[in-house]
Image (cartoon, rainbow, N blue to C red):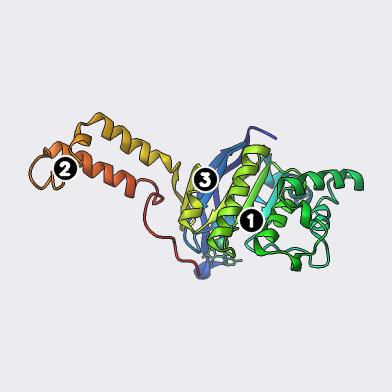
Amino acid sequence: MAEEVIRVHDLTKVYGKAAAAVRALDGFSFSARAGEMLTLFGPSGSGKTTLLNILAGLEKPSGGEVSVGGQSLAGLKDADAFRAKNIGFIFRSPNLLPVLSVRENIEAQMRAVVAGGSARRRRSESLLGMLGLTEVANLRPDELSNIQCMRVAVGRAMANDPALLLADEPTGDLDSRGGKELLELLTGLNERAGVTILIATHERSVAQAAPRVLHIADGRLVGDRRPDDALQDALRLLAESEVGGKVPAQGAAARGLLSAEEQAVLRRLLEKVTTDAGGVAGGADYSFT
Ligand code: ADP
Ligand code: MG
């Protein structure tokens, strides 16, 4: 796999025709390096699922270029085989096969890619261990909790050791504790297995779990921020000014203790942290319909 795992250039997707046409993606460009973990953050209908589906080769773009692992998806002869080998997909609901055990659900995913039952067994043993599922390996999905089912879905997505893991609203059906657990699991996989992860979400707290946030609105990239940047900028400004020493004095600005310049620094600080973070630093979640 190339150093650049995702490369998307001027991507457009139009659904429908003429007056009924919807531009789900409108000139979207970005790239992600191997080993990055990033979130795609935007409201319902902003184009997140469309982008993930195109990256996975599940949908064809109307225009623009997409490469995964250096391979242009437009030039693929067998998109299914490429996806099976290189891309893991986690959906909002686990979609496990109810008649198969946890182990079988994971191994079934390997059929087309990993030859030999014993090789599949070795790989599933290691995944089950990594995901904390060894003790439930022989249980069926209906005997598991929601978060355990999501762990199995992660195991299935990781079954063929993909370079890229895509997750579409993966915490959507979990409570906040389950959501946190899942994000920790994904972060751990990113750090230990080095897999590149892109998570689509409308939830701010989920978006903030990654070091890089792509902010999408109306099919366009409107922000590409590491959430830390705004804070770092603000702290740098604070350090360079001498305003820090005066801030604790209550009502300092009002009593004229701060110069106009110092007040401007304070205003910039607040602006940085609240707006320039691509909306990530403050405010509520997007509503989800
Ligand atoms: P998100 O995942 O951010 O909620 P989607 O990618 O699902 O956004 O949708 C983006 C836009 O494209 C929305 O306006 C949606 O209604 C529209 N859309 C998505 N899929 C289809 C489809 N198969 N046919 C027509 N319109 C679609
Ligand atoms: Mg969606």
Regarding residue 232, the answer to whether it shows in the image is yes
Say whether mark 1 is within 8 Å of ligand 1.
yes
- In the figure, 95 relative to 259: above or below? below
Decide: few, some or many residues near mark 3? Use Cα within 10 Å; few <14, some 14-19, many ≥20: many
- How many angstroms separate mark 1 from mark 3 (CA)? 20 Å
Quadrant in which ligand 1 is drawn: bottom right
Q: What residue sits right under mark 1 in the picture?
A: 53
The picture places residue 99, in percent across and down from the top left corner, at: 83, 67
Residue at 62% over, 48% down: 186
Q: Is mark 2 within 8 Å of ligand 1?
A: no
User: In this image, 181 relative to 79: left or right?
Assistant: left
Distance from Cα at disc 2 to Cα at disc 3: 35 Å
Along the viewing direction, whichever of 70 and 134 lies nearer the viewer: 134
Please name the residue shown 61% across and 37% down the image. Answer: 35
Q: Position of residue 221 (x, y in %)?
A: 47, 49
Q: Is residue 231 left or right of residue 164?
A: left
Q: Badge 2 is on which residue?
A: 249
Q: Amino acid at mark 1?
A: Asn
